[in-house]
Image: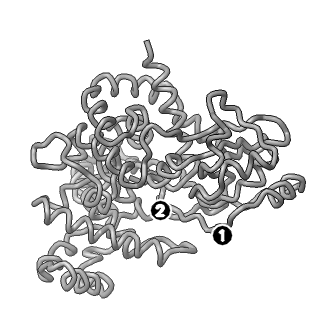
Amino acid sequence: MYDSLPTAHTRPTHRPDTDRLCAAALRKRAAPPPRSRLSRLAHALGVVLCVGTFALTCAGAHAQARAKKVAQAEFEEEVVPQRYAANPDVDAFINDIAARDGFDRTELQRVFSRVLFSQTAARLAAPPTTPTQKNWTRYERNFLDNTRINGGVRFWNQNAAALARAAKQYGVPEEIIVAIIGVETIYGRHMGNFRTIDALTTLAFDYPPARNRSERMALFRNELENLLLYARERGIDPFSLYGSYAGAIGIAQFMPSSIRNYAVDFTGDGKINLTNNVDDAIGSVANFLKLHGWQAKQPIVWNIAGDRGSQGLAEAGADGQPEPHWKLGDFIKAGMLMNEPRLDVGASLDTPVLIVDLPTPGQATEYRMGLTNFYVLTRYNRSFFYAMAVYDLADAIKAARAP
């Protein structure tokens, strides 16, 4: 489900007061450090084979080279043959889940003797060698394009019945479901070609050097356990599942734990198939959001007025916390103006909100006010950029589809 690896917001939570907001708005603040690393999209590297001999004199050599290339193809990323067979860390993991989940230890050893180390997955999971600046304008441009907008309209039209049923059952608007699937896989076009058990095992036991390496490895070991449980529960060969380098599977890019906890059989055929069944993917996205607290028929984002005072208050309130921990009244009493003509401010003063900051180098930071449903979107991918891109893409698709 995570196009980038999930990152936690680490700044301390605190409650605001009007005086502190006013004071903070009047101070010139230094730019806060980035809350989380945004992973960059990456592509797998190809292998170029150069041959510098004459064809007529080297037919045998060419045949030998082709045979060698075919033999290497299956194991081109396998640096150490059977890397995870008789591996002490893997054996400890096997013992753990055999005791906890009732797996057959011998069978798990056979499974892991077939798992391949994925050098590409490890490389893509590695943090960038040099820090990169967060750039909202560039990020949004990657997702708010004609491919996803026009594709979203087609996807909606082709799956209108399932989307309408999911919206009614779970209270999640059709355009939000469509936009998430559009951001994740361009409506199923790019679901990933990594064998999931290889990717998860690699990141669970060979995660690249990073500040939070131990936490990441624990996360991926949990997902690996859930993959094995899911395969056992559904009678699926764990080697048959493919997805992203981080182990996300299917049209909506669910991690194995999310498949087990939130995926639904929306077609009623007795199976859950998030790779080939669009209806199951649609229902599962809606169910995920509902179970994370989605509020039906409630707003997601409010726009803040562009005057200097309102923008200063937004800057002061942008503390990086993803949960709505302020109240609208905190900002209104401090003098903030809203750019929401239909908003009944007086009746909404107690509404929990957060400030969403969207920085672009060389430009003024954009600020918006997020509500509970915005926070729910960050449960899918823990990034303000991600949630706002979903929101803006949903609006664009809905507008393009309107008669």
Q: Is 170 placed above or below 393 here?
A: below
Q: Earlier in the sequence, mark 2 or mark 1?
A: 1
Which label was assigned to residue 125? 2
Q: Nearer the viewer, residue 143 or 82?
A: 143
Q: What element carries label 2?
A: helix
Whether residue 49 is visible, yes or no, is no
Point out the image quarter for the C terminus. top left
Would you place residue 116 above or below residue 4 in this image? below
What residue is shown with label 1?
Answer: 12
Q: Which residue is drawn at 32% across and 38% down?
A: 188
Q: In this view, does 87 lie above or below 321?
A: below
Badge 2: residue crowd in 10 Å (few <14, some 14–19, many ≥20): many
Q: Distance between the residues labelled 2 and 1?
A: 27 Å
Q: Which amino acid is tagged 1?
A: Pro
Where is residue 201 drawn, in percent x and y?
Answer: 32, 70
- Residue drawn at the location 71% of the way across and 44% of the way down: 360
Where is residue 219 drawn, in percent x and y? 40, 71
At 23% from the left and 82% from the top, the residue drawn is: 94
Residue 184 location, quadrant: top left
- Figure colour scheme: one colour
Label 1 residue SS: loop
Spot occupied by residue 269 in the image (x, y as percentages of width and height): 10, 43
Instruction: Residue 201: tell me if it is visible.
Output: yes
Q: How many marks?
A: 2
